[in-house]
Image (cartoon, rainbow, N blue to C red):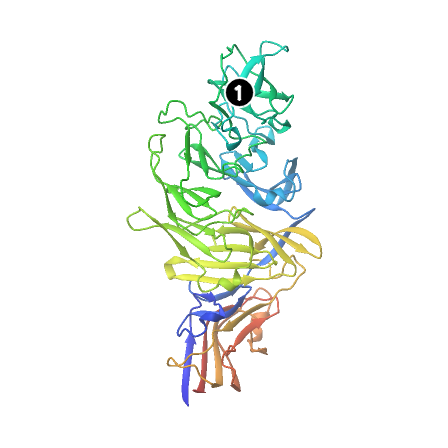
Amino acid sequence: MGNFLKTQNTFSFGEIAPEFYAINNINGLSSLENMDVLQSGGLKRRAGLKTISQIPDDAILIPFIISETEKYLLVMYGRIIDVYENDIKIDSLFAPWTDINLKKLQFAQRFNKIFFVHPDFCPQIFTKDANGFSIKYFSFHLNTDASANIPFMRFDDMEGVAITISSSAIDNNHATFTSDKDIWSNDWVNERILINNKQWIVESVQSATVATVYTNGDFSFPGHPINDWYVAVFSDKRGWPMSVSFHQNRLVFGGTKTVPNNIWMSKVGDYNNFDVGTGLDDDAIFTTLLSSQHHQISTIVSSDNLQILTSVGEWAISNSPLTPSNVNIKQHTSVGSPISVYLPPQQIEGSTVFISQSGKDVRELDLDDLSQHYNANDLCSFSKHLMNNPVSVAFNQSTHQLFIVMDDGYMAVLNKHPNTEINAWGKYITEGDFKYVCVADNDTYVVVKRENKFYLEKFDKTYLTDAETYNFSYKISAFPLIVNNHNPKKIRVRKISLRVIDTKTVFINNYRVEIPNSVYEANKPGYCGDLSINLLGTQTNTMEPLWTISSDEQLNATILSVTVDGWYLI
């Protein structure tokens, strides 16, 4: 038998998975619900939720910050974009995407425009100008002969197919394309074809070997079948960009359904022009991820380098400035990212943080000391039990919190304070289900489903309840006790003491801890000091926590440390 006096004055690891319960002196907890880990390592009851409005359906949220005076939040659901300013809806626009499309919708902002991409839709541009808000199709720059500065390539279904061009009875701008194999079908209509540096558009299909096409300007009839021909990369038939970003003043598109491992970059400063030209420094750039594995681009990130996250690995293009003749691309790590849902990577302390393909890892893509190679460190090594099919992610720089909404309605929250080595995971639970999270202008917004209705809400430290109606409780539980590197078989607790600040309610193992009544007076701050309770009980299941601190009262609580005094048997 021996005595022990154990004080925990930092909770820097947050909630730890049970497989780590045998590790000694780990500053974690077996449970952390609805509390935040502070930069000091202490714990504070989370902020409540303020209702902004009820919304018609489940939605995604996108920040649209143009300047210090123009800050908006886009709430997008079933073909609708609602625009909020100062938490008030000020406009509503029609959009092409249905609810199911929104899961793969990616976006990138440049000044007063947001570029949206989806593999099944032509890219769209959402704009705020002097006339208000608008959304329109993205169009590639047209030359004087109506040719488009769009990338072209050969696809597998074109290999070995020769085309004969002949005149058409319609007019001088039309021609007939006759192929020596069956290739034409109605999905070729409006496809753009490049033959002998001349662009043609398919107008109609007469049979599997005959199509009517048109062009602008003069053209000549080759006296022989043409084998060397190309089609536009982007179209309804071939697919549209799956990912988008801006890098070194270029618009960057990543992957389509038919060519999932290609990257296209516009001319410098000319975002509608993807003409590779003669390879001048400011011309458009085309590159392919070459690997023995099948890589499907998940998303692209403009950071210190252009980072390309795929289904099976992480790549980077590291040249600066980036030119057609100077593209240094290589794979750095082999983690992989989800492709069935868009989980935007977050920029945190100079690193790119992303969700792994497995959905069980949160990885931090960071350059090594020589700035030559990326590593993908796991940020949730001790807390993977909290990762359960992530559906939304956002980082709040002002609170140093990473929020990840899970499919079953709770949020895993990472409190990350590198300066004090805080990397603490916990869980947020509310009455209902969290559906989506977004950070706009340092405010954390969520879509919440309550009683089969959907609401736009935001965290507000002045609110002690959720949505002004729903109470929530907090709970923290101790890590199983290890004493002198031993696993005790029996523990008897004499006393548990807490050091607290601004606290008005606390229970230890369901026993209320007495707090001076003066703190409950109107406008009085919570109690600061030490609190204790004598618990003369014996515990034989030593895997169970020695203490659980909780409260279901809607009052402030901040716990700085916990001390346990008792004896044990091994």
Residue 329 lies left or right of residue 175; in this view the side is left
Q: Quadrant of residue 324?
A: top left
Q: Quadrant of the N terminus?
A: bottom left
Residue, x 56% and y 47% (percent of image)? 340
Where does the image place residue 541, in percent across and percent down from the top left? Answer: 52, 82
Extreme residue toward the front, this view: 180
Where does the image place residue 226, in percent across and percent down from the top left? Answer: 49, 19
Where does the image place residue 172, in percent across and percent down from the top left? Answer: 58, 9
Residue 34 visible within the image: yes
Amino acid identity at mark 1: Ile
Towards the viewer: 480 or 440: 480
Q: Quadrant of residue 301?
A: top left
Eyeballing the image, is 567 above or below 504? below
Residue tagged 1: 163
Towards the viewer: 4 or 228: 228
Q: Quadrant of residue 130?
A: top right
Where does the image place residue 264, in percent across and percent down from the top left? Answer: 45, 33
Residue, x 64% and y 35% (percent of image)? 96
Eyeballing the image, is 93 above or below 29? above
Q: Secondary structure at mark 1?
A: strand
Count of numbered circles on the image:
1
Extreme residue toward the left, this view: 370
Eyeballing the image, is 20 above or below 46? below
Q: Quadrant of the C terminus?
A: bottom left
Residue 75 visible within the image: no
Residue 89 lies left or right of residue 485; in this view the side is right
Towards the viewer: 68 or 214: 214
Extreme residue toward the bottom, this view: 1
Residue, x 46% and y 55% (percent of image)? 362
Badge 1: residue crowd in 10 Å (few <14, some 14–19, many ≥20): many
